[in-house]
Image (cartoon, grey):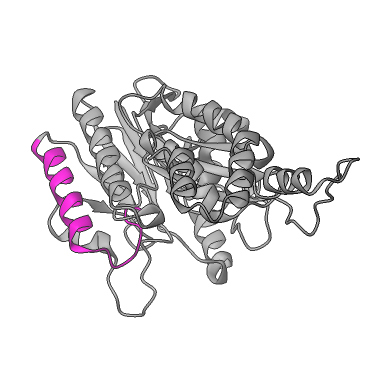
Amino acid sequence: MQILHISDTHLGKRQYGQEFREQDVYDVFNQLIDIAIKEHVNAIIHTGDLFDISEPGTRAEIEAIKALKRLKEHGIPFIGIAGDHDTPKRSNTSYPQDLLSELDLLKFLYAKNMMYTIGDVYIYGLSHTPNIYKERLKMILSALRPEGKKNILMLHQGIKEELPYVGAWQITEKDLPQDIVYYACGHIHDRILKHLDGGRVLEIAGSPDIMREEEIDGYTQNGKGGTLIDFSKNEPEVQFINLDIRPQFVETIDTTKLDEEIKRVQNKLQMYRDKHPMLHIILTGITIPREHLNKKLEVLRQNASLVRIFKDETKNMQEKKIQLPSNTRIDDLIIEYLMKIEGFRKEEAEMILDMIKHTEEKDYVKSQLKKMLGI
């Protein structure tokens, strides 16, 4: 008995407004479907945030329907709960999972319909419960009397031990029903696997793609994808399945040695052949004009699908103390300013100074500008 656990697929999400990122999300979801079919799993369980919003666009719904139809053709049930992103924000509004359930493509579990069986495995599921109703959630969990020696509880909640921030969690590990063997959880985007007392397993599948730059460290350490749960024996065996996703990484660039830093990052980008990575930049050093910076960064866009300034930690020119040359010649002052404040290389600064001295010679200045700009 093999079950594939996936979560937080966020179908329809267009990260940073980029269309290619929406396609990435669909591609990753279809990779998971392909794995389920190839491995002949007995079921897929999805622990919430199937969609990125509770009223997804037509394309997101169509992509979900096409993928789940493939599962149905292979006799693989898709069992899901709703996450906070799936939960309607208006009263008397349906969950997006309701449509898939009506089409017999998804077994939707919630408080009034919270059990489904696959062979000798009992699967229980509760859709996301917001903070305002967390006491009610705890009552439901404490009243749960699961059947069978092989059982799973699907949740999409903040758990204090994993998300210890004010307002971020609704339950603690002590609130989990003791007679459940396997807790399959969503909501947190990083993978977590914990063995609790009594042989119980707490597993968080994480998102199958990098949805926020804060997830990059977790992806680097543990990968992204799904979790294969083998219930063939008395105790479940767990295997993480990694996917081929678009790489993302954060790079710190010191503007005081901009050309050197850009060359270093460019060499790293060129290592990726199949999918151009997404590059998140942290700027340090001194503030330089954004137009000049963007011109310098343009070379990185040749090998990156997206280049964005993640954080700007540079110091502005008012905070920069210039060490004046001892001879204080005006030419040296200009060179010093162009290099340390504007971020030009020495040869560029010297060319600019030369053009300043020949401002009346328009043809000469024009030829020097072309040379400087590489035209």
The image shows residue 147 at horizontal and vertical percentages of 40, 42
266 horizontally vs 18: left or right = right
Front-lying residue, 307 or 30: 307
Q: What residue appears at the point 29 percent right and 68 percent down from the top-left corner?
A: 55
166 horizontally vs 69: left or right = right
Q: Is residue 57 shown in magenta? A: yes
Q: Which contiguous range is marked in magenta? A: 49-73
Q: What residue appears at the point 18 percent right and 50 percent down from the top-left corner?
A: 63
Residue lying farthest to the right in this orientation: 326
Quadrant for the N terminus, please: top left
Main SS of residues in magenta: helix
- Visible residue check, residue 190: no
The image shows residue 265 at horizontal and vertical percentages of 52, 30
The image shows residue 74 at horizontal and vertical percentages of 11, 33
* Numbered marks: total: 0
Residue lying farthest to the front in this orientation: 361
